Amino acid sequence: MRYESFRIAAFRDSGVAPKLYFGFLDGQGATARYERALLQVCAKLAQLLNAYAQEHGVAVRVSAKEIAVTQLAEGGALC
């Protein structure tokens, strides 16, 4: 009940409803399997993005951790 009150107040005040997120990406707890899957996908994505950047002369490169942190910071969650 307390979490639902917080969720309603947060949505009312900001327009954003908090969701269950992965947490610390430590591979432990209830979301461990999702954390591992996220990091695996991010590793493959980083390779693809960096290869594309190299082919097109773009100097910026990204790491899997940067992608994962950005995904979570931008609202990625388990609904």
Image (tube, helix red, strand yellow):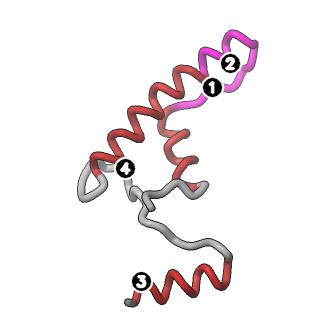
Q: Where is residue 43? Give x, y as percent.
A: 45, 29
Mark with earlier residue (2, 1): 2
Q: Identify the residue shown where x is 30% and y is 55%.
A: 31
**Residue 46 in the image, given as x and y percentages of width and height:** 53, 27
Local SS, label 4: loop
Secondary structure of the residue carrying tag 2 is helix
The 10 Å Cα crowd at callout 3, few under 14, some 14 to 19, many 20 or more, is few
Q: Position of residue 70 (x, y in %)?
A: 57, 47
In front: label 2 or label 1: 2
Inspect the image, locate mark 1, and give the three-letter code of the amino acid beneath it: Arg
Find the distance from the CA under tag 1 to the CA under tag 3.
39 Å
Say which amino acid is labelled 3.
Answer: Tyr
Would you call the spot at circle 4 few (<14 residues within 10 Å), some (14-19), or many (20 or more)? some
Q: Nearer the viewer, residue 68 or 19?
A: 19
Q: Which residue is mark 3?
A: 3
Cα distance, mark 3 to mark 2? 43 Å
The residue that mark 2 highlights is 53
**Could you tell me which quadrant the C terminus lies in?**
bottom left
Q: Which stretch is magenta?
A: 50-63
Name the residue tied to disc 1.
61
For the residue marked with disc 2, what is the amino acid?
Ala
Q: Residue at x 55, y 85 (%)?
A: 8
Q: Nearer the viewer, residue 53 or 38?
A: 38
> Contact, CB < 8 Å: mark 2 with mark 1?
yes
Sequence order check, earlier mark of 1 and 3? 3
| Residue holding disc 4 | 25
x and y percent of residue 21 in the render?
43, 60
Q: CA distance from mark 1 to mark 4?
A: 22 Å
Q: CA distance from mark 4 to mark 2?
A: 27 Å
Q: CA distance from mark 2 to mark 1?
A: 7 Å
Above or below residue 59? Residue 16 is below
